[in-house]
Image: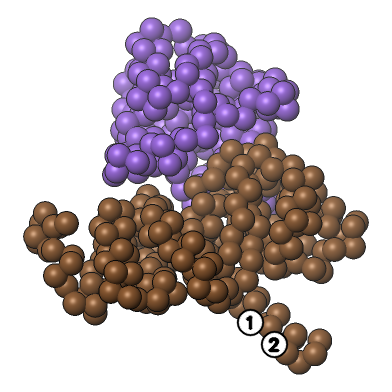
Chain colours: A brown, B purple
Amino acid sequence: MANQDDEIILSELDDDELVLQMHDDLYDGLREEIEESVNILLGRDWAPYDVLTKALVEGMRIVGIDFRDGILFVPEVLLSANAMKAGMFILRPLLIATGAPRLGKMVIGTVKGDIHDIGKNLVSMMMEGAGFEVINLGINNSVEKYLDALESEKPDILGMSALLTTTMPYMKVVIDALKEKGIRDDYVVMVGGAPLNEEFGKAIGADAYCRDAAVAVETAKEFMFRKNNILAAGG
Amino acid sequence: MHLDPKTINDDTLTETGLAATSVADVSGRVLLLACGALAREILALTRLNGWSHLDLACLPAKLHNEPQKIPDAVRAKVRDARARGYTKVYVVYADCGTGGLLDKVCAEEGVERIEGPHCYSFFDGNEAFAERSEAGEITSFYLTDFLARQFDTLIWAGLGLNRHLDMPQMVFGNYEKIIYLAQTDDPILEAKARAAANRLGLAFEIRTTGYGDLAGFLATAAKE
C-alpha cells in the first residue's frame, strides 16, 4: 500500500526502514499501514515477539514520550493506540503459540457508575504493547466484578479508572473489600482518571496513582521489577 | 452590574472569560467568580432580582475540558478580587472534575462555592440529579444552554472529535442519550441540542430545568 503523500510502498522497504516507517505510522495512527507492515515482517520470518518489541512497543514508547511532553494529546494517542491494537490483534495468537515472555498480568476496569473508558483503554493498549497481559473488564464495574476477576485471573496488578468526582470514591470501596478479605497485599493496585491525584491515591490506600497511560506503564514495570527481585531474593 | 446578557459573546466566554464588571470603589459589593459557561444565567438572575450589588467575573469556559487548571485559576482570581477590595467573593463553580482540589482552594481562600459535582447537577437540582444517577442515568451526556450553543467549539473540536472519523465512537461509544438541560425555553437551542445528538448518533431528551439550585445560591450571595 502506498502512503499517498510520499508514495511509500511498504513491501519495498528493507527491515530497518520498515520498522522506522512503522514507528511513524503508529505515531500517525495509521491502522491499515500497521496491519500491512506487521504481516510483511511476519512474512519475512520475523519472530512475533520481535515484531511486538522492535516495531510496536518501541513505536508506542515514542508516542508515550510525546504524550507526556504535551506534544501529542489524548485524541492522537488514542489513534496511535488503535493502530497498535490492530497490530496486536494479528500478533496475539502468535505470541501465545510461540510462548513469548510476559512482564505481568493486569486486570483493569472503570468503576461502578462510570462509563468513561478512554483513559482505561489507552492504559490497557499501552500495557499490552509493553508486554503485559491485560484483562479489560470494561465499564461500570461493581466490587463483586473486580473480586471475581481477581479470583479467576490471578493478576499481578489491579487497575481502576474513574472520570467522575462522584464515582472515584468507589475505588476505596474496592480496596477496602480487598483488605477485608485479607488479599490486599496479593495485588498491586494502580488508580487513574482525570479527577484523581496523588493525594487521593494515597488516601484510599492504592499503591500508585498514575496521571497518564505512559506513567501507568512505567509504574507497572517498576512494580514488577521490585516484585521479581523480592521473589528472587526468596522473600 | 449592568451587563445585558444578550450582548456578551459565547466565543469570548469560552476563550477568555469575562472581566469583573464593577465601579472603581467596590466596597459593599459582592463578587461572583464563575465559569464563563454560566455568565448569561447569572446575569439573567441578577437582573431579574435587582441584585445590582453583585459583580461578575468569569474564567474561560474552555477550562471545562482542562479541569486540572481550575483550582489555581480560581485561587488567582480570588486573590485579585481581594486585592481590588472585595471582601465577599462567591465561587460559582461546582467541583467540575477537580476531584476535591477546588474545595481545598476554596477552604484555603475562605470562600464558598455552589454545591454540586458539576453544573448539570445544580441546574437539575443536586438532590434530583443524585437520585437519577442512583436510578441508573449514567449513560447520558448532558448539554446546557451554553453547551448547546458552543457544542462545536467545546465538544466537537474541544474533545478532538473532528480529528478522525473514529473519534466520536471512541469518545461517545458508551453513551446512549443526550439530555439537554434547558435553562431557557428556546426552540433554536433545542434544535441545536437535537442536532448534536444526531451528529453523535445518540437518542435525545429535553429536560427543562430553569436555573435550578443556581438561583438559591445567588440569593444567598445577594443577602450578604
Residue A156's spot in the image, x, y percent?
A: 70, 68
Dot 1: chain letter: A
Indicate left or right for B15 with B23 as reference. Answer: left
Quarter of the image where the C terminus of chain A is located: bottom right
**Amino acid residing under circle 1:** Phe
Residue A188's spot in the image, x, y percent?
A: 72, 67
Q: What residue did someone put label 1 on?
A: A225
In the figure, A59 relative to B73: above or below? below
The residue positioned 70% from the left and 64% from the top of the image is A155
Residue B128's spot in the image, x, y percent?
A: 70, 20
Residue B209's spot in the image, x, y percent?
A: 57, 14
Q: Nearer the viewer, residue A137 or A113?
A: A137
Dot 2: chain letter: A
Q: What residue did someone put label 2 on?
A: A229
Q: Can the viewer see residue B133?
A: yes
Residue extending farthest bottom:
A233
The residue positioned 38% from the left and 68% from the top of the image is A56
Asked which quadrant contains residue A132, the reply is: bottom right
Indicate left or right for A82 with A125 as reference. Answer: left
Q: Can the viewer see residue A27?
A: no
Quarter of the image where the N terminus of chain A is located: bottom left
SS class of the residue under badge 1? helix
**Amino acid residing under circle 2:** Asn
Crowdedness near tag 1: few (<14), some (14–19) or many (≥20) residues, C-alpha within 10 Å: some
How far apart marks 2 and 1 lie (CA) works out to 6 Å
Cβ atoms under marks 2 and 1 closer than 8 Å: yes
Q: Residue A38, labelled with which disc?
A: none
The residue positioned 63% from the left and 48% from the top of the image is A137
Count of marks placed on residues: 2
The residue positioned 40% from the left and 63% from the top of the image is A67
In the figure, A88 relative to B22: above or below? below
